[in-house]
């Protein structure tokens, strides 16, 4: 049975550790219990209140609300039940890193994976990952409360990397990466 070559992957693990450290430093106020007052998150809580109450009362997925705009499907802002069984990965990252920090970590990690799949030098990949995660638009959408938009931007490089692996006939790793990043 082949053994795991730690020496080969040590630089990559150090880079991922640096990503965690940089995300925590950037989001330092979150470590002291402070939270962003993101307006869209507050609005979402108000929009989803009726559907959440109905889901708690009946246990069934609520698919429509009459209280917004004269009627609106709730799948755009609330799902009581979900079939996403990969969510434990994100839950694990969220327990390790507070809310704004994990957005930046996911973006750095996904972009680093993409650059490695493309064959870019690991140190250039790390610099590119920093540039991608901390680009001007990302802190703005996080402050506004566009959490799902940031998560989509964060995971998209990993999706692209998985698709590239599939095209290169690395079926299992490509499907696993694409599936996890899409989920």
Image: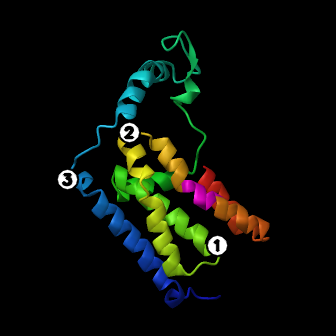
Question: Which residue is depicted at the point 40% across and 56% down?
Answer: 102
Inspect the magenta stretch and tell me whether residue 154 lies in it: no
What's drawn in magenta, residue-wise? Answer: 155-159
Q: Residue at x 65, y 64 (%)?
A: 161
> On screen, 162 above or below 142?
below
Q: Nearer the viewer, residue 51 or 66?
A: 66
- The vertical placement of 117 against 77, above or below, is below
Say if 107 sits above or below 68 in the image.
Answer: below
Report which residue position mark 2 lands on. Answer: 144
Neighbourhood count class around disc 1 (C-alpha, 10 Å): few under 14, some 14–19, many 20 upward: some
Q: Earlier in the sequence, mark 2 or mark 3?
A: 3
| Image location of residue 105, percent across then percent down | 43, 61
Labels 2, 3: front one? 2
Q: Which residue is mark 1?
A: 117
Query: Would you call the spot at circle 3 few (<14 residues within 10 Å), some (14-19), or many (20 or more)?
Result: few
- In primary-sequence order, the first of circles 3 and 1 is 3
| Residue lying at 42% horizontally and 58% vertically, measured from the top left | 104
Q: For mark 3, what is the residue? A: 32
Foreground tag (3 vs 1):
1
Q: Secondary structure at mark 3?
A: loop
Residue 152 in the image, given as x and y percentages of width and height: 55, 48
Tags 2 and 1 in contact by the CB under 8 Å rule? no
Between marks 2 and 1 in the image, the one whose residue lies nearer the viewer: 2
**Disc 2 element:** helix
Q: Nearer the viewer, residue 82 or 151?
A: 151
Badge 1 element: helix
Horizontal and vertical percent position of residue 171: 76, 67
Separation (CA) of disc 2 from disc 1: 32 Å
Residue 72: x and y in percent read 57, 17
Q: CA distance from mark 3 to mark 1?
A: 37 Å
Q: Is residue 160 left or right of residue 170?
A: left
């Amino acid at each position: 049975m082949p053994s795991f070559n730690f020496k080969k992957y040590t630089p990559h693990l150090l880079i991922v550790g640096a990503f965690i450290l940089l995300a925590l430093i950037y989001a330092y106020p979150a470590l002291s219990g402070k939270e962003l007052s993101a307006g869209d998150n507050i609005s979402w809580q108000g929009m989803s209140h009726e559907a959440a109450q109905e889901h708690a009362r009946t246990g069934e997925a609520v698919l429509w609300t009459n209280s917004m705009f004269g009627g609106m499907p709730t799948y755009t802002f609330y799902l009581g039940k979900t079939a996403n069984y990969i969510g434990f990965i994100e839950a694990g990252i969220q327990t390790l890193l507070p809310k704004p920090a994990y957005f930046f970590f996911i973006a750095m990690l996904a972009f680093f994976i993409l650059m490695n799949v493309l064959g870019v030098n690991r140190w250039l990949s790390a610099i590119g990952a920093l540039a991608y995660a901390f680009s001007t638009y990302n802190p703005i959408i996080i402050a506004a409360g566009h959490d799902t938009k940031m998560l989509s931007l964060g995971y998209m490089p990993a999706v692209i990397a998985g698709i590239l692996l599939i095209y290169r006939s690395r079926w299992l790793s490509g499907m696993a990466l694409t599936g996890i990043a899409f989920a």
